[in-house]
Image (cartoon, grey):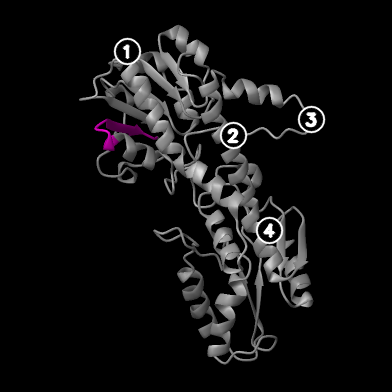
Amino acid sequence: MTVPTPITHDLKPDLSYVEAAGRAVFEAIPKGSNTIVVLESTVYPGVTAQTWLPIVEELGLVIGEDVEIAYCPERFNPGDAAHGVRQVARVIGCSNPDVGKALVALYQKLTTEDVRYVGKLEVAEAAKVIENVQRDINIALVNELARIFPALDVDVEDVLSAAATKWNFHRYTPGVGVGGHCIPVDPYYMIQRAADVGVPAGLITAARAVNRSMPSHVAGVLTDIMWNAKVSADDARVLLLGWSYKAEVGDPRETPAEPLAETLMAKGITVGAWDPHLDIKSFPDGVESVTDLSTAQDYDMVVLVTAHKACLELDWEALLAHMRTPLLYDGRRVLDLESLKAMGWKTHAVGRPLDS
């Protein structure tokens, strides 16, 4: 069973899909069938048992006779053919070791990588959620550095490249924000579970705050760049290249482009967006949908938000010819800024001092 595990408007885990789907399945299980039900959604430690066991008991089902519950988190990397569902390792948690071992044999038929039984449900649940928590923390570090170093007149990418010469340094790249339905969501599940047992999750909470605030921070930097370039505050126009949360993926869920656009529009700036992987219905009200870059006229700044191949390889000279002000901001640190500068663009980037 794989169902959404989102968060509510107040950043709390929403387990309604897990509960509803579980009830629907358990109501259909025949007595005495000992049907194994496996949850694959990302949850915090304890959710599978806490959510499903009361339903099992309410329906009069008996664990070990009518039903068994297990947990095997879904793992794959959208847009990454090398790490699809059949190319990633799996972990299985179940209170019944025999069922756990049987599920190992089953999942070994579904992936070419390692499959292992890890014991308790909670171990497998925790393993999945902290995978994404760890990435959120690592990204938060470089995003925070991308805010600190420009104030010191230092480019964060120069620092990271220098640090990466040490064999055990793990290099991440800053960006306009973290998107998708995993990294910006899953830490709140771990934060909630820690609160339930009375243990602070200060580091996880702080990392989430840094990444959540990056679009607002970048919006402030963009306005500073435009005002320094004498762009009129009354009719400034910004074009976002890419809207989906990840390169080569047509998925706008939790994209940092949306809060970035909202913050800019709240300042009275007109925002347009172009994303070859999305249709015009993917953009919120107020954002100008650009379907053909040749029609993108009189923008004052272009911001690379998503590093789609089409964004990186577009005709930058042609786009430059349509600009009212030739400002360019690399929000992913993937562009050849020197070549673009030689072309006539006034280049800027996340984590780089404004006057460099």
- Disc 4 or 3, which lies upstream in sequence? 4
Closer to the camera: disc 2 or disc 3?
2
Q: Earlier in the sequence, mark 1 or mark 4?
A: 4
Mark sitting on residue 142 = 2
Q: Callout 4, which amino acid? A: Ala
- Could you say where residue 13 lies in the image, as x and y percent from the top left? 49, 63
Measured as percent of width and height from the top left, residue 14 is found at 46, 65
Residue holding disc 3: 167
User: Looking at the image, is mark 2 or mark 1 nearer the viewer?
Assistant: 2
Mark 4 in CB contact with mark 2 (< 8 angstroms): no
x 47%, y 29%: residue: 331
Q: Is residue 115 left or right of residue 225?
A: right
In space, the residues marked 3 and 1 are separated at their CA atoms by: 44 Å
Residue 252 in the magenta stretch? The answer is no
Does dot 4 land on a helix, a strand or a loop?
helix
- Image quadrant in which the N terminus is located: bottom right
Residue to which mark 1 is pinned: 321
Residue at point 43% right, 23% down?
329
Residue 11 against residue 37 in the figure, above or below: above
- Which of the marked residues, 2 or 1, is nearer the chain's N terminus? 2
